[in-house]
Image (tube, helix red, strand yellow):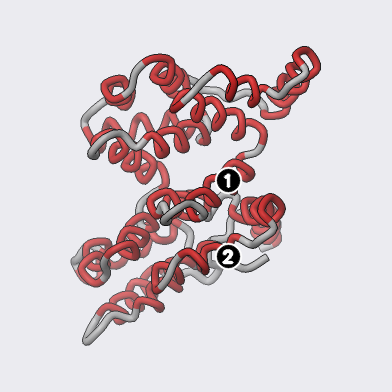
């Protein structure tokens, strides 16, 4: 218990493993929430957002064993729109989710460069290695080949380099590099990139640099841009809230408040609505 409490103290996600977890009871609870006239969406959201992804996979297995049905299919039949997409994302293991997002980015209508850049710039070398394996298994194709078929030039080359990087050096050593650059040339690397590059290549280079400096700061900016432009970029908002909820959402919230003078929670409230909003606020984990 002492070790578990220490683990939770060091935990920077807004969604933590539920302490008194019982997969069978949770499966029964979800079954009741979906049974009969109407669906108790709020009960579903509250339960799933207060369980870790690993625990959700156990609930999925218990549901299949007890009711002989796939839980994700059952949830999809009861929900719709953005809420359905968000719940399906929550029920997907993180590496599978990243792989599916990359596949969607490459195989949909046009290329979703924002998703490509965000995932490949922010994930660790080990995570990328796992994503490549899962992508091959799930979609029967090589991620590198699909990227090369959909992109070009130096942008393509840098994406491929990010795929091939297996060991990321310590972030502090990269920070020293930035300081040295500034001393030598009198400007930040970012300014040089913005002055010398354009488009997707510029966006990718800046994303890599921002992630090296601070991943929470990078995602605070991603979230702000997803909501504070004309119309909400729900795919980016959803992907970020789901993928960071168990990793560093508390740090992202702190960075968001510091950078923009408003809480992430309030911004989500102002930009979204309904059960979809409720689900995002549960993932946010509180107001600052």
In-image side of 168 versus 10 (left or right): left
For residue 87, above or below residue 213: below
Residue 142 or residue 233, whichever sits in front: 233
Q: Residue at x 69, y 58 (%)?
A: 261
Give me the C-alpha separation between circle 2 and circle 1.
14 Å
Nearer to us in this view, 191 or 65? 191
**Disc number placed over residue 221 in the picture, else none:** 1
In the picture, the disc for residue 7 is none
Is 149 placed left or right of 282 in the picture? left
Residue 87, x across and y down, in percent: 35, 62
Question: Quick one: which residue is furthest to the right in this view?
Answer: 183
Quadrant of res 159: top left
Residue 104: give x, y in percent of width and height. Answer: 28, 40
In the image, residue 69 sits, relative to residue 99, either above or below, namely: below
Q: Is the residue 202 above or below the residue 153 in the image?
A: below
Q: Label 1 crowding class (10 Å Cα cut-off): few <14, some 14-19, many 20+?
A: some
Q: Position of residue 256 (x, y in %)?
A: 64, 53
Q: Position of residue 284 (x, y in %)?
A: 55, 62
Secondary structure at badge 2 equals: helix
The local secondary structure at tag 1 comes to helix
Q: Residue at x 56, y 68 (%)?
A: 19
Q: Residue at x 23, y 28 (%)?
A: 141
Q: Earlier in the sequence, mark 2 or mark 1?
A: 1
> Dot 2 corresponds to which residue?
265
Observer-nearest residue: 138 or 23?
Answer: 138
Q: How many neighbours does mark 2 have within 10 angstroms: few (below 14), some (14-19), or many (20 or more)? A: many
Q: Quadrant of the C terminus?
A: bottom right
Q: Tell me: 131 left or right of 205.
A: left
Q: Is residue 129 visible?
A: yes
The single residue placed furthest to the top in the displayed view is 184
């Amino acid at each position: 218990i002492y070790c578990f409490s220490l683990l939770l103290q060091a935990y920077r996600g807004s969604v933590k493993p539920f302490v008194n977890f019982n997969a069978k009871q949770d499966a029964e609870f979800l079954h009741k929430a979906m049974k009969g006239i109407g669906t108790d969406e709020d009960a579903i959201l509250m339960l799933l957002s207060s369980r870790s992804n690993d625990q959700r996979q156990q609930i999925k297995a218990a549901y299949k064993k007890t009711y002989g049905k796939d839980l994700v299919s059952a949830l999809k039949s009861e929900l719709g729109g953005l809420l359905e997409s968000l719940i399906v994302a929550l029920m997907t293991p993180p590496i599978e989710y990243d792989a599916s997002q990359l596949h969607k980015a490459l195989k949909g209508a046009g290329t979703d460069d924002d998703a490509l850049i965000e995932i490949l710039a922010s994930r660790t070398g080990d995570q990328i290695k796992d994503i490549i394996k899962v992508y091959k298994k799930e979609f029967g194709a090589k991620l590198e080949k699909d990227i090369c078929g959909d992109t070009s030039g130096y942008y393509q080359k840098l994406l491929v380099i990010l795929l091939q990087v297996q060991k990321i050096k310590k972030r502090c050593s990269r920070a020293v590099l930035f300081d040295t650059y500034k001393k030598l040339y009198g400007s930040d690397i970012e300014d040089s990139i913005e002055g010398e590059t354009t488009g997707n290549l510029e966006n990718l280079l800046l994303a890599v640099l921002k992630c090296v400096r601070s991943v929470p700061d990078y995602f605070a900016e991603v979230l702000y841009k997803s909501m504070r432009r004309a119309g909400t970029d729900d795919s980016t908002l959803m992907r970020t809230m789901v993928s960071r909820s168990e990793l560093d959402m508390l740090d992202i919230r702190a960075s968001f408040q510091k950078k923009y003078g408003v809480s992430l929670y309030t911004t989500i409230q102002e930009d979204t609505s309904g059960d979809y909003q409720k689900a995002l606020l549960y993932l946010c984990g509180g107001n600052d």
